[in-house]
Image: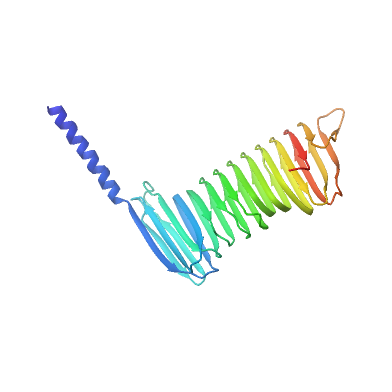
Amino acid sequence: MRIASCLRGALLLLAASAAATASDDKTFDRQVAAQPRGVVEISNVTGSIEVSGWDRSEVSVHADLDSGVERVEVSGEGPRTTIKVMLPHTSSRGSEARLKVKMPKDSELDVSAVNADVTTSGVLGVQRLSAVSGNISAELAGADAEVKTVSGDLRLKGHGQPARLHVSSVSGDVHLEHGAGDLEASTVNGTLIVSLDSARGVHARTTSGDLRFEGKLTRGATLEASTVSGDLNVRAAADGGFAYEVSSFSGDITDCFNASPERLSNYAPGSRLEGTRGEGAGHVRLKTMSGDVHLCDRP
């Protein structure tokens, strides 16, 4: 009986402790007036950041905060609205903040995160999104975008509207679909997968990750892609065709139009494939060290 009584007491203490911890969690809500074409800056260390665009000239912030979060600061000065999650200097335990932000859809968006995932949708202005170990998922419109992580994955979806896009990750994967315009993309250890509805210029590179491109090139467009030890697979249709230069030090080169690569030397590894498809208006240059390369002029 004594043991059972002790067990019941311990369970009651645990339940009380859990309830006290839960009661320390809190929510935050605030709305501030904002210019329809201003700038919204958001920073968060741990948790998540979810941003959506709307037609109102105001910024709405809702946050679910762990007990370790000190406060959320929201301030506006001129065209700029700033949202910051503030943590105590002594400890970061229990410090997640889950932000949901609505902003004027035509404004610029700057997001800085450490260990927080970032999601955006319906934002038509320029987007600058960065995270250290968080993943980023973004909907891209016809405005320029710069998206980068260190160890997180990037998943980006456009609507075929031309823009200047800069995307990069060190050890995460990068997936871009329905992009258009000019693209600079890079990874070190991650896989890079790109689908462009219409491309004016593409510069893509990986170190040890595979790189796959599929899409259409405008007349006179340039596509340059390279890897060190990853494989390259490029399927690019082009208005006016393209001249191509493909090289690999120790990997195989193949294509879908029955051209044959040539050896660079009888005594050392290395092969090259050069030629023209259609009028040769554009340029495609592909290079690997130890990876295989496949080129096709059909998507």
Q: How many marks?
A: 0
Give how far across and how far down residue 242 sits, in percent. Answer: 82, 48
Q: Nearer the viewer, residue 162 or 132?
A: 162
Which quadrant of the rendered structure holds the C terminus?
Answer: top right
Q: Quadrant of residue 206?
A: top right
- Colouring mode (rainbow / by chain / secondary structure / one colour): rainbow
Report the residue at 40% width, 49% height from top: 96
Residue 232 in the figure: left or right of residue 78: right
Relative to 112, residue 55 above or below: below
Residue 121 in sight from this viewpoint: yes
Report the residue at 55% width, 59% height from top: 123
Report the residue at 71% width, 53% height from top: 198
Q: Name the residue at the bottom extreme.
A: 78
Report the residue at 41% width, 52% height from top: 97
Give how far across and how far down residue 211 sits, in percent. Answer: 68, 40
Residue 88 in sight from this viewpoint: no
Residue 281 in the figure: left or right of residue 161: right
Relative to 187, residue 2 above or below: above
Give how far across and how far down residue 15 sits, in percent. Answer: 24, 40
Q: Name the residue at the left extreme.
A: 1
Which quadrant of the rendered structure holds the N terminus?
Answer: top left
Give how far across and how far down residue 204 sits, in percent. Answer: 69, 46
